[in-house]
Image: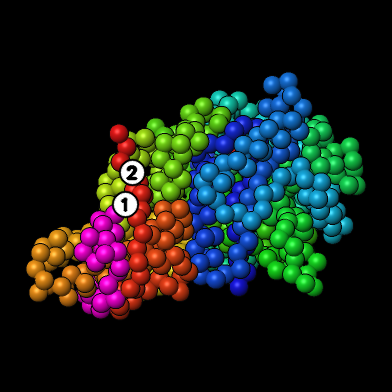
Amino acid sequence: MSFFITTAINYVNAEPHMGHAYEAITTDVIARHMRQRGEDVFFLTGTDEHGEPVADAAAAQGLDPKVLADRNAERFKALLPSLTISNDFFIRTSDPQHEHRVQEILQAVHDHGYTYKGLYEGWYCPRCADFKVENEILEGNLCPIHEIALERHQEENWFFRLSAFQEPLERLYAQRPDFVLPRVRFNEARAFIAQGLADVSLSRAHLRWGIPVTWDPSQVFYVWFDALLNYVTALSYAPPPARPGERDLFARYWPATVHMIGKDILKFHTVYWPALLIAAGLEVPKHVLIHGFLLMDDKKMSKSLGNVLNPFEVLEGFGADALRYYCLREVSFGQDGNVSAKGFEDRYENELANEYGNLASRTLAMVERYREGTVPSAETDATLAQELDGLADQVAGLLDRFELTPALELIWQRVRRLNRYVEERAPWQLARDSSLAAELEQTLASLAEGLRVVSVLLHPYMPTATERLLEAFGTPEPAYSEAHFKRRGSGQRVRALEPLFPKRA
Ligand code: ME8
């Protein structure tokens, strides 16, 4: 089945921060897991380049917006391989193909009668590129997200008749209880709709850095409509080339399976976006999946608050797998969570180095020492088999509901179980007594098999370390169909493995 998954596209008004890395990582875990299960995955990410936030940041640095966009888009692009993100395409909203397709789709919305010209006045946050409604505004007329002064803006521009979609959206939410996940966000979106939908402005009169409105080229489209449409436009020009008989990827992948986004942009994705799609005559996505914020000192980490944790530095010190693991383990997916250098180092040391890395090197060393590097093809331990049977199904069930942290927790319980198994069986004692050879063989076969199973399941979370481990054990296939505990050891030769998570000085 086709499985189209997207991240939000990132503003290029500043460099990437941990929040962006977090979103790419969580999306990548789902994409990799679904590929393991044989789904036809298409994973899209990219940059959001038009509008006030970028125009203002460029002006402040005396740059042309396109120059700033080019520079920062490169940084966002460069972050992806260093996080081992497996995206299939990277869209930039300054791509001419995107611009052209946005014009076509919004022209259709106009032709269907969902636009009109009107006067807009309201409190506007230039960082959000959004007008704020009265009940959101903080005391002193501050933006609730950026805590900066809002500006009073008035201009004549084109409106989108969001109010016409009150009933269609209510119906959508009544029929599709999993349209927005998790549930608490579904309720939030539904409550927003229940308040009554007001029309929203679709264009900007005083901005040049955007896509011209086809029927009124003196204006550009409001950046949010331009940006949201990336999810559709990308399918009209992204490689891989369509299969024979396909004009492009649209028929194969639309509607999107999952839009992964942060909680601050809920309204745009759960209200404006489905309304816009219906207005254009397109299908709405299957799920909008909403993650929380990474917090440091209990404040959202963001470029405008100035407490940025640089993902490049974290990666240099610990590597991508460690960062990926930490993000999924420390922060309960869907909720906000604090991240800290101390918490990171603790988990690295205690869980990655000691529990997983050490289990792998001990097991390999014992296979080497006691059985000359061959995993015995002995029968595996029945109790352990019982404890690992069904694990792959449980993990798949959780990940079908995008429960990323509980799935990791479940796998990690088995990593700990395998460590206990080593202690219980004490293979170094069994090795001293040749009458216990069968027990020793069973122990080694079971450990190797258990490590193989947990590594296949951990692969989406930590692709590099698990691949290295699986190769060292001579069982390199991380396909999901291989994720069950086998009744016999593999009989494979093992190879030496450098520590997966070396202890830091
Ligand atoms: O909102 N923790 O771009 P953006 C976790 N261009 N996630 C965070 C975060 C944090 N501290 N800070 C930001 C935009 N994010 C628009 C999106 S989509 C059509 C247009 C998340 O660069 C944020 O919630 O400000 C969003 O999902 C993504 O990073 C990009 O944020």
Q: Residue at left 25%, top 78%?
A: 379
- Gap in Å between the C-alphas at discs 1 and 2? 8 Å
Would residue 349 be found to the left or right of residue 484 on screen? left
For residue 487, say whether it is visible: yes
Disc 2: which residue: 502
Determine whether label 1 and label 2 are within 8 Å by CB.
yes
Q: Nearer the viewer, residue 382 or 375?
A: 375
Disc 1: which residue: 357
Which tag, 1 or 2, sits closer to the chain's start?
Answer: 1
Q: Is 133 situated above or below 455?
A: above
Residue 223's spot in the image, x, y percent?
A: 73, 41
Does 501 appear in magenta?
no
Q: Where, by quadrant of the figure, is residue 297 drawn?
A: top left
Quadrant (top left/top right/bottom left/bottom right) for the N terminus: bottom right
Circle 2: residue type: Pro
For residue 110, say whether it is visible: no
Q: Residue at left 40%, top 50%?
A: 325
Q: Secondary structure at mark 1?
A: helix
